[in-house]
Amino acid sequence: MKVFYSDVYVLPLPEGHRFPITKYRLVRNGLVEQGIVRETELHLSRPTSPDVVKLAHAPHYVEAIQNGTVERMIMRRIGFPWTPELVVRSFTIVGGAIMSAEEALQHGIAGNLAGGTHHALWDAGEGFCVFNDLAIVTMSLLTRVLVRRVAIIDLDVHQGNGNSAILGGREDVYILSLHGEKNYPFRKVPSTVDIDLPDNTSDAEYLPLVQREVARVLAWKPDIVLYQAGVDPLLEDSLGRLSLTMAGLAERDRIVFDACKAAQIPVSVAMGGGYAKPIERTVEAHIQTYKVLREVYG
């Protein structure tokens, strides 16, 4: 198994910034320390080119990110200050996502220890998302005719409005989103299938929906699944509003991995969101996703 990572995923942020940027390094270190991912299975993510990013984003927006001329309002919507480090990080996260998808097509499973930036739109970022790695990977694979059908299984607690805004309406893309009905983004863009969950949804209510909808996705026979494995449905998450337990999240991941393995459909895993306080609970949940992955795939 190959898992892609780069130290540039940890972005220097102002003191007191609300985004838990340290989780990327903590997850990477925890996976190795616990023996879930071997050092030899970690591979350096390389930044992708602007032309690849432009497959899913407006050229003027990509160029503005590169040269620091992004409108102040857009940077406020993104939630990060513009810095050269942000530029490198953004292109590298997409590069890692593409490398992960290519590896999954070759060997069935791979992951990127970042990404799932599903709020970024065609011509703007928002919600801590600069570029939409899921949409870019989808367009890259389809444009190169490496696949004919792509499915995005998005189980982050926040609806992937950027996925649907960029890719919605394509007959070769299936987007499933299970998310908090009353949570961000407050203007949701219709996916292929949206499951709106009320506040405090429990494991018992959530897991049968995942089982049913994942089966429907795979019945569509995609050539690859891009799995947005956000852990913010966790009860302790500060931005989640759902009530999943750690065991419930593990079963959610197991449902996805078991079904894809049984159907012999490659899976590329993106980390997605997680904002628990303390952040160690989120780190534990992200690590657990790879623990389940290892149990299913060996």
Image (spheres, rainbow, N blue to C red):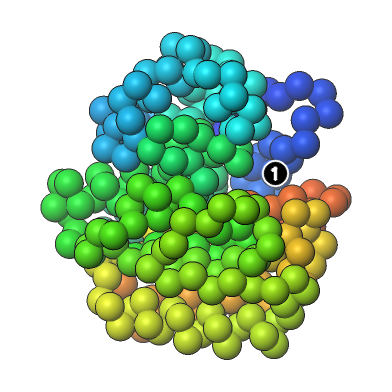
Classed neighbour count for the residue bearing mark 1: other residues with Cα under 10 Å, few (<14), some (14–19), many (≥20): many
Q: Is residue 43 visible?
A: no
Whether residue 212 is visible here, answered yes or no, is yes
- Secondary structure at badge 1 equals helix
Q: Where in the figure is residue 179, as x and y percent of width and height?
A: 60, 66
Query: What residue lies at 14% left-to-right and 52% top-to-bottom?
Result: 145
Amino acid on which disc 1 is placed: Lys
Residue situated in front as seen by the camera: 170 or 216: 170
Seen from the viewer's position, the closer of residues 48 and 26 is 48
The single residue placed furthest to the left in the displayed view is 145
Determine the residue positioned at 79% across, 49% down: 279
Residue at image x 76%, y 64%?
Answer: 241
Decide which of 197, 259 is in the foreground and name it.
Answer: 197
Q: Which residue is drawn at 59% across and 71% down?
A: 196
Figure quadrant of the N terminus: bottom left
In the displayed structure, 235 sits above or below 219; it is above
Q: Position of 113 compared to 235: left or right?
A: left
Find residue 158 and report its horizontal and vertical position in percent. 61, 57
Q: Quadrant of residue 264?
A: bottom left
Q: Identify the residue under disc 1.
A: 23
Q: Position of residue 193 (x, y in %)?
A: 43, 72
